[in-house]
Image (cartoon, rainbow, N blue to C red):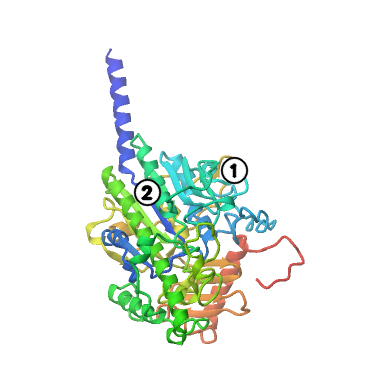
Amino acid sequence: MQKTKLLLCSITLLLSSLFSFSQQRPNIVLIMADDMGYSDISCFGSEIPTPNLDRLASKGIRFTQFYNGARCCPTRASLLTGLFPHQAGIGQMTEGAADTSAYHWGTPGYQGYLNRNCVTLAEVLGSTGYHTYMSGKWHVGMQREERWPLQRGFEKYYGILEGATSYLKPQGGRGLWYMNTKLPPPQGNYYTTDAFTDSAIAFLQEQKDNKPFFLYLAFNAPHWPLQAKPQDIRKFEGVYDKGWDKIREERFARQQQMGIVDAHTKLSRRDTAVRAWDALTAAEKKDVAYRMQVYAAQVSCIDENVGKVIAALEKKGQLDNTLIIFLSDNGACPEPYKELGGGAVSDINNPELSGAISYGMGWANASNTPYRKWKRETEEGGISAPFIMCWPKGIGAKEENTIVTTPSYLPDIMPTFIDVAKAKYPAVYKGHSIYPITGRSLAPVFKGDTLSAHAYMYWEHESWQAVRRGNWKAVKDKKGTTWSLYDLSADRDEEHNLANEQAAILNDLVTHWNDWAKNSFVFPKHADPDDKRVE
């Protein structure tokens, strides 16, 4: 009898310990916007009110030098795996519904889907007892079921596998999926940003146990096409009649006041492909101001839905012990590279369309205030992300509403989640060797500790290349044969090329970039031995 009592007591203590361990580890909510610029939310300088994201920032930490991967699917590959996108198999783009083999180039870095030498955040966190849910845009493998969310560690999934869709009526190859089932086009009053959030909240409400959860909510907004709810569009009536030059100036002034940029940062010159606002005709101004109005409505709806997630967590009593991270996947989008946008104004809010109906290069330039360039390119405007971390229980009171300026990037997310979840990163997973991660955890900032600096940081996408060491950054664009060099401590707007004056520094950066590229499957881009393209 005594042995039985002791055994029961031991079991009770064990279960209590396990329950306590489960509760101590935070829930994790990772929210990503799609093609949203650095300055498009109000806590990073925007005129677009985003009170819910502002709330997270006021109780959390903003990073002003957090970098993404310059484009949708390479960013997602790196975010989900903690690796560089080429290591995960998506050095270029990912396979689509219609284009099934264009990015399968026969080399390890260019397969067009996540390979099996990487593990996803869901696979790592699921292995340590987390529930794993995803709602929204996948965009890291589509052609075979083995490449879908449920086969890469998520328990539940609702969203689009493709890279873009109609907000109002997802259909065809850009249609909706629930779990592993293709859904018919939705009928009636439908909007993806709302639906993705409602599905995410439903997953949380369906959970009956006390295990921690990981939720990945990947909006397709504000990616083209321009489609927004009428009530959201009305909020911004007349706001953009003043034009992109004035909006850039006003955003920059707010960024200076907030401390998002330092005293050395200047507002970059308007892109050379964009005219001064006053040079546009009255008809052009009316057209493109309305496009920005719709874009702002899309951003506003993201914030509204972030608020719904916060409210759901509060209702369940889980907000305090939930780590929430918000970021954007790349700089604002200039596609299809027209000053005044793609498609006709009459195409806006046509539910049958899912193509590049967009707001154009002028507004993309404004969205990335104060930096140069945009999505796809590796200048600061292409890779700088608005980044917020909020964890009421985990962030010290003195660290609330603070700004971190230490450069950080996507490979740091996996180590951060492993750190707070007390998880382990595997060397082997389901019989496959897993590439080691090279990032470092962001968790020290929760208690006010200084982050260690990355020795070097690397990027490559479509032959746009960049490398950073301390405040020195070298950049080479797709058409260039030489590298440019910038001192970001004095010139983060990348206006003054110091390549000739600082040749030794540039040589060091380029040497390290080449070594990284060779070791991270950036080269070769094609299996063809006769491929002579300049990389």
The residue to which callout 2 is attached is 28
The residue tagged with tag 1: helix, strand or loop? Answer: helix
- Residue 289, position in %: x, y? 42, 75
The answer for how far apart the CA atoms under marks 1 and 2 are is 25 Å
> How many residues crowd around disc 1 within 10 Å: few (fewer than 14), some, or many (20 or more)?
few
* Badge 1 amino acid: Glu
Is residue 342 toward the left or the right of residue 445 in the image? right
In the displayed structure, 76 sits above or below 484; it is: above
The residue tagged with tag 2: helix, strand or loop? Answer: strand
Is residue 161 toward the left or the right of residue 419 in the image? right
- Residue 152, position in %: x, y? 53, 44
Q: Quadrant of the C terminus?
A: bottom right
The residue to which callout 1 is attached is 146
> How many residues crowd around disc 2 within 10 Å: few (fewer than 14), some, or many (20 or more)?
many
Q: Of the residues tagged 1 and 2, which is closer to the observer?
A: 1
- Residue 436, position in %: x, y? 53, 52
**Residue 387 can be seen in this image:** no
Q: Quadrant of the N terminus?
A: top left
Q: Nearer the viewer, residue 343 or 201?
A: 343
Of marks 1 and 2, which one's residue comes earlier in the chain? 2
Q: Residue at x 55, y 58 (%)?
A: 85
Q: Nearer the viewer, residue 99 or 17?
A: 99
Q: Residue furthest right?
A: 530
Please give the label number shown on residue 297.
none
In the displayed structure, 381 sits above or below 171; it is: below
Q: Residue furthest left?
A: 397
- Residue 493, position in %: x, y? 44, 79
* Badge 2 amino acid: Ile
**Residue 441 can be seen in this image:** yes
Task: State if disc 2 and disc 1 touch (CB < 8 Å).
Answer: no
